[in-house]
Amino acid sequence: MRAYQDMVYSTAARLTGNDAQAEDIAQEVFLRAYQHFSELRAGASAGGWLKTVTTNLALNHLSRYVKRWRLFSELAESGTGEPGAPPIEWEVPETQFADISTEQRRQIIDDALRRLPQHQRVALVLYHFEDLSYQEIADRLGVSLPKVKTDILRARAALLALLKANGLVRESL
């Protein structure tokens, strides 16, 4: 448990955007791990198993307890995603965060992620942190492929705006 508690908790926290929910999910993950201890102890894939269970429990929690996402009303309200809009530059030079520690950088990114709308945060986390393809995300969330692509695009733009507003990313990007 000690070896994987940070990974389990951070995965749940990034997906849910809520510390209390992440703690509940982490507790449930380790209860399930205890139930399957004999299988996990012998295998080298315990970390992967824990990450998969954490992701699945967090997604189940979100789909069960939070309102379903609304694509068309969000399109109208946000004003983004219009045809012909310039592409969003997402590459951040390594020197951009050179003066802060890895832990501070992680905290800044996590705080910015928590400020994103849930549907954007979940899609972005599954793509960038869980390395799922667009199609895998669409299948897991039960939404269309274009919705996943739109949510990730908007999440990147919103995250970039949050980082710029906090002075962490220069306007020249």
Image (cartoon, rainbow, N blue to C red):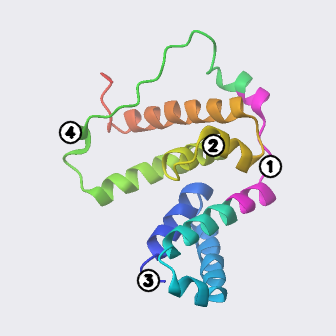
Q: Which residue is mark 1?
A: 67
> Mark on residue 2?
3
Determine whether label 4 and label 3 are within 8 Å by CB: no
Q: Amino acid at mark 3?
A: Arg
**How far apart are labels 2 and 1 at the CA level?**
12 Å
Q: Position of residue 170 (x, y in %)?
A: 30, 29
10 Å neighbourhood of mark 3: few (<14), some, or many (≥20)? Answer: few
| Labels 2 and 4: the sequence-earlier one | 4
Front: mark 4 or 1: 4
Q: Which residue is mark 4?
A: 95
Q: Is residue 14 above or below residue 57?
A: above
Q: Is residue 135 above or below residue 74?
A: below
Residue range in magenta is 59-74
Give the SS element for disc 4.
helix
Quarter of the picture containing the C terminus is top left
Front: mark 3 or 2: 3
Determine whether label 3 and label 2 are within 8 Å by CB: no
